[in-house]
Amino acid sequence: MKKSFALIAILAMFVFTINTNLVAQTPDTDTTGSAVEDTTAVVEEETVAETPVEENLEVTDEVAETDGSVHEVIKEKFIEGGAMFMSLVLIALIIGLALVIERIIYLNLADTNTNKLLESIESALETGGVDSAKEICRNTRGPVASIFYQGLDRADQGIEIVEKSVISYGSVQMSLLEKGLTWISLFITLAPMLGFMGTVIGMIGAFDSIQAAGDIDPALVAGGIKVALITTVSGLIVAMILQVFYNYIVSKVDSIVTKMEDASISLIDILVKYNKK
């Protein structure tokens, strides 16, 4: 935006310079009235060119002041809400977001193209046998490949053993996918509770002020009520943010588990077909 304002100013100066040169180069035989008209036109063009720049600069300053005031308001409300309870709510948000980011990264890395993996395993079984298929699983990232490896490792013990192995190791991988969700749920519940605790303490402070003054004065109770409302709102905002990420993580886990179950059934079918040959 500042570059645009500078460009407008440069263009205005350029137009002003050209008009000035034209006036200076006008022959002496021209009438005085023509020179006055040219000079007036130049002044008007300069005024028109400079006015938007000044107005735009004022608008930019107002926007900058507004942006700065947002941060100031947040900091002010944080201080007014009480350093102790607001800090606890902030800590809950930071730890909750850290757990959320870790789970999202882990789940995205755990997601596998099961159809492509099954095709590779089936092709490897036909060309190189079980060892070749195990090598593919060993070099593939994700819980589905780990489950396939456990099943292929017991392929010589019969389909029933393979099926039990796949089911058992699938439960292990499912628990790894759901790791950390309990802690995220804890902070979702804890953040509003901390806000409500600040609300209760703020109201207690307001009633203490009323008792000390012996009269109900809005100025006395305003501070305590403000603390109560700020802490409550902060706790609810933190809980809503973490709840959105929690629901996304749960849906991602469900999607991966569904793929694991479908892929495990397909693996059993492939091994049955392979043993019949």
Image: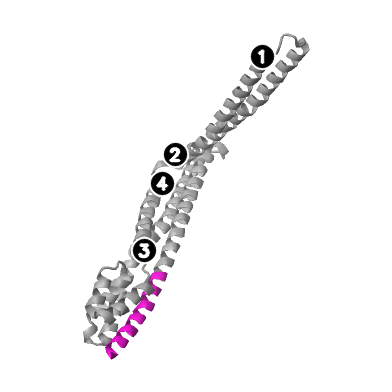
In reply to whether residue 259 is colored magenta, the answer given is yes
Could you tell me which quadrant the N terminus lies in?
A: top right
Q: Is residue 6 or residue 225 the one in the foreground?
A: 6
Local packing at callout 3 (Cα closer than 10 Å; few below 14, some 14-19, many 20+) is many
Q: Secondary structure at mark 2?
A: helix
Labels 1 and 3: the sequence-earlier one: 1
Labels 3 and 4: the sequence-earlier one: 4
What residue do we see at 44% from left, 62% from top? 248
Q: Secondary structure at mark 3?
A: helix
Gap between marks 2 and 1 measured at Cα: 67 Å
Mark 1 lies on residue: 25
Task: State the predominant SS element of the stretch in magenta.
Answer: helix
Amino acid type at circle 3 is Leu
Labels 2 and 4: the sequence-earlier one: 2
Amino acid type at circle 2 is Ile
Labels 2 and 3: the sequence-earlier one: 2
- Give left or right: position of 252 versus 158: right
- Give left or right: position of 184 versus 69: left
What residue do we see at 40% from left, 74% from top? 258
Q: Which mark is residue 79?
A: 2
Q: What range is drawn magenta here?
A: 255-277
- Give left or right: position of 114 versus 36: left
Q: Decide: marks 2, 4 in contact (CB < 8 A)? A: no
Could you tell me which quadrant the C terminus lies in?
A: bottom left
Residue 221 at x, y percent in the picture = 53, 40
Mark 4 lies on residue: 85
Residue 202 seen in render: yes
Q: Secondary structure at mark 4?
A: helix
Q: How many marks?
A: 4
